[in-house]
Image (tube, rainbow, N blue to C red):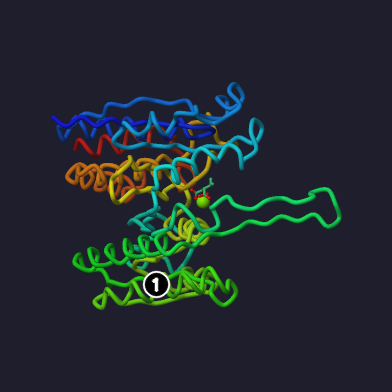
Amino acid sequence: MKNYRIAFIPGDGVGPEVALETRKTLEECGRLFSFAINSETFAWDCDYYLEHGRMMPENALEILKGFDAIFLGSVGDPSKAPDHVSLSSLLEIRKGFDLYVNLRPIILHKGVPSPITTATPETVDMVVVRENTEGEYARLGGIFAPDAPNGFATQMAVFSRKGCERVMRYAFELARTRKAQGYKGKVTSCTKSNALNYSMVYWDTIFREVAAEYPDIETNYLLVDALSMIMITDPGQFDVIVASNLFGDIITDLGSVLQGGIGVAAGANLDPERRFPSMFEPIHGSALALAGKGVVNPIASIESGRMMLEYLGETEAAGALLKAVQSVLAKGDVRTRDMGGQSGTAEVGDAIRAALKA
Ligand code: IPM
Ligand code: MG
């Protein structure tokens, strides 16, 4: 029997609640599909920061390296640590393990209400491949003479050939796989080369080069502003979108609205080369105002857990879990407030696990 070592970092706010539902669901999948989830929990959150002056121990990556995968709930509590400090742990793991693909499916499941009138299960079925290690998140720059009238800050973005090529290739390979499954087979590049005359011009150049290797895949370029608009007016034209780190961050929050809200939006930070453990997390934050109330939607997290199962090669379990999630969503009697229901976090988790067993 396969035995997976999973590191859980529940984090702050609602993180622990959604991580618990995810762990229970993965364990249930293990019971049903004959594998074991051997989990270890790491309390690397803002309380850890208050105690130790850092978000994770110095050897955190060394510790995490031994795991098959990582699940992260959500991090951040500005009453304890400024966000740019607390979020450093997340960014350190992404960068330290070179998890260069941030995969964010945008799917509107049947029965899920979306406030966007163009959004239907037919039109909203795309994947954003977000670059996850460089771009605007390179953390290079400085604040100079902050208190002086001529004070200024710089924030440098890094776009390396290697960094662009590999994430674009991943997007094209994904489009090929999807095409074989009946999707369009199309990659849209999210750019802004009209204004960002170095970084995005280089991004475009590399996109053209990589695209030439995939003549079977349709391509399109859209400036991020127009792309944001078209995601709302005509979501059906997208299949795979490849985006730089910051643009990918922004358009996936936008995309979450198409798919019924941030409560259902899942994500995976992947090292496609499998040198290091990949990390799975909902794209939402710690939602401190809702923490401890048992009311948040665990589906984004459980869906991220499903992406973990796919990554681990437990395709059958992942397929069954998807069906379970879809059946709970389609039935609609058990849903959290963000989806217009009355149910709590645990009830939704229980309903999904019950559907799994059925
Ligand atoms: C996300 C989040 C993070 C990001 C924050 C918390 C640093 O918004 O995963 O989308 O910007 O990458
Ligand atoms: Mg974000």
Q: Give residue 267's position: percent from left, percent from top.
A: 39, 49
Count all numbered tags in the image, as a single digit: 1
Q: Give residue 221's position: percent from left, percent from top.
A: 43, 76
State the residue position of label 1: 207
Quarter in which the C terminus is drawn: top left
| Between 197 and 356, the one nearer to me in the picture | 197
Residue at image coords 34%, 56%: 109
| Between 47 and 91, the one nearer to me in the picture | 91
Residue at image coords 36%, 68%: 123
Q: Residue furthest top?
A: 51
Q: Quadrant of residue 341?
A: top left
Q: Quadrant of residue 242?
A: bottom left
Q: Is residue 32 above or below residue 244?
A: above
Q: What amino acid is at disc 1?
A: Phe
Position of 296 compared to 162: left or right?
right
Q: Give residue 177's position: percent from left, percent from top.
A: 22, 63
Quarter in which the N terminus is drawn: top left
Q: Give residue 147's position: percent from left, percent from top.
A: 83, 48
Task: Confirm if mark 1 falls within 8 A of ligand 1.
Answer: no
| Between 149 and 12, the one nearer to me in the picture | 149
Q: Secondary structure at mark 1?
A: helix
Q: Residue furthest right?
A: 149
Position of 29 compared to 94: left or right?
left
Badge 1 density bin: few <14, some 14–19, many ≥20, Cα 10 Å: many
